[in-house]
Image (cartoon, rainbow, N blue to C red):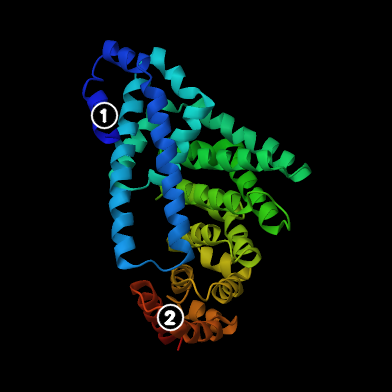
């Protein structure tokens, strides 16, 4: 119903007069509500799949729901882009509620291949250089407030700000601006926040902040693909790799933070000529991965992601030897033994095969 109704609005959004009628009918509020719901459902689905293995039937149902969610989201992105193209209505899209719904949806769903182009169009139309710069300059203030008084509302503000920075970076020009502003100060603030929050014993929204921060850096890196200079500033000079290692060491049970941190790590080590592997090994990355393996013996998804990260290092003889010397192989063997007590799902089988392949390479 939502998809068909919103689609009808997109079909007639081909003139300023019709866009005005769509806005007057309250369509912006309706689109906002749909994006909020899509984001919430996406987060809920991720929480379910990260906690336990799901049956084949459950996986089919979740896949069907995901397809419907993506359809609704694609129509919402298209409609907001149409509204944003009319200058007098563009201000309607700058309210905190609309911006929050839009950026959360872009951050959580915008990387989907079927939505990426629409998300890119939306960000290009709605977000300007001043908006990006403002978000970058807000980070130090919010981090200072969080350090001084870690209240939930400040933590939520930080999470939303990180999501916003990540969503902006879907446009490559915005990513370059974020990394280039003030000699990379925005990225340094992101990294400093990750370090502070990962080491905190009591921090509201801890997993949300770590997840959003790691994802934001990963999204910026993806947008900068091919630009070695800016990637070096983003991933190495800022200390991002070391921050990821700290997250892995300090909070190995925070599932979503682990997923995003490992994803960032795999990306960093895959950039040719960057030598992120040396920074990872030097900061105790292999021991950190061993900690994650120990803490998540019943979660094949996290185990698989961790082994994937380690696989990047055993491509060279030096890396393979480093994995053995720093306790990686010993923990991998222990993890392999523990998997015999886990339901033999496709994810578990893949994880076992990965571990065996990695051990064979080290040997």
**Residue at x 59%, y 66% (from the top left corner):** 252
Would residue 293 be seen by someone viewing this image from the given angle?
A: yes
Q: Is residue 355 left or right of residue 78?
A: right
Q: Please identify the quarter of the rendering in which residue 361 is found.
A: bottom left
Which is closer to the viewer, label 2 or label 1? 1
- The span from disc 2 to disc 1 (Cα, nearest Å) is 49 Å
Note whether 58 is above or below 23 in the view shown. Answer: below
Instruction: Out of 296 and 243, give the one closest to the viewer.
Output: 296
The image position of residue 8, as x and y in percent, is: 23, 26
**Residue at x 63%, y 52% (from the top left corner):** 206
Numbered disc 2: secondary structure: helix
Residue named by callout 1? 5
Residue named by callout 2? 355
Looking at this rendering, what residue extends furthest in the right direction? 148
Numbered disc 1: secondary structure: helix
Instruction: Out of 79 and 59, give the one closest to the viewer.
Output: 59
The image position of residue 127, as x and y in percent, is: 45, 28
- Of callouts 2 and 1, the N-terminal one: 1
Note whether 252 is above or below 79 in the view shown. Answer: below
Point out the image quarter for the N terminus. top left
Instruction: Out of 120 and 3, give the one closest to the viewer.
Output: 3
Instruction: Out of 100 and 5, give the one closest to the viewer.
Output: 5
Note whether 222 is above or below 342 in the view shown. Answer: above
């Amino acid at each position: 119903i939502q998809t068909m109704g919103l689609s009808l609005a997109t079909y007639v959004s081909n003139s300023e007069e019709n866009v005005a009628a769509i806005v007057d009918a309250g369509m912006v509020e309706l689109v906002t509500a749909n994006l909020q719901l899509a984001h919430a459902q996406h987060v809920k689905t991720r929480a379910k799949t990260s906690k336990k293995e799901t049956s084949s039937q459950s996986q089919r149902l979740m896949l069907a729901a995901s397809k419907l969610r993506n359809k609704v989201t694609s129509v919402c992105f298209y409609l907001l882009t149409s509204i944003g193209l009319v200058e007098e209505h563009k201000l309607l899209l700058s309210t905190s509620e609309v911006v929050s719904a839009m950026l959360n949806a872009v951050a959580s769903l915008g990387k989907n291949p079927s939505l990426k182009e629409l998300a890119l169009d939306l960000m290009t139309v709605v977000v300007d250089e001043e908006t990006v710069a403002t978000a970058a300059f807000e980070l130090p203030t919010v981090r200072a407030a969080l350090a001084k008084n870690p209240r939930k509302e400040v933590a939520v503000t930080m999470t939303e700000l990180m999501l916003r920075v990540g969503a902006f970076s879907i446009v490559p020009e915005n990513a370059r601006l974020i990394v280039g502003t003030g000699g990379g100060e925005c990225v340094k603030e992101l990294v400093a926040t990750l370090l502070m929050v990962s080491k905190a014993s009591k921090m509201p929204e801890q997993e949300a902040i770590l997840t959003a921060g790691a994802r934001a850096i990963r999204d910026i890196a993806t947008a900068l693909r091919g630009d070695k200079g800016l990637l070096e500033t983003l991933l190495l000079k800022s200390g991002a790799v070391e921050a990821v290692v700290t997250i892995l060491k300090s909070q190995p049970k925070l599932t979503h933070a682990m997923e995003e941190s490992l994803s960032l790590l795999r990306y960093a080590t895959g950039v040719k000529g960057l030598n992120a592997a040396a920074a990872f090994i030097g900061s105790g990355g292999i021991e950190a991965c061993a900690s994650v393996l120990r803490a998540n013996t019943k979660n094949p998804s996290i185990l698989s992601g961790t082994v994937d990260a380690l696989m990047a290092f055993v491509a060279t003889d030096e890396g393979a030897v480093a994995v053995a010397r720093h306790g990686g192989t010993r923990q991998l063997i222990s993890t392999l033994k523990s998997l015999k007590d886990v339901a033999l799902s496709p994810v578990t089988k893949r994880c076992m095969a990965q571990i065996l392949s990695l051990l064979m390479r080290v040997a």
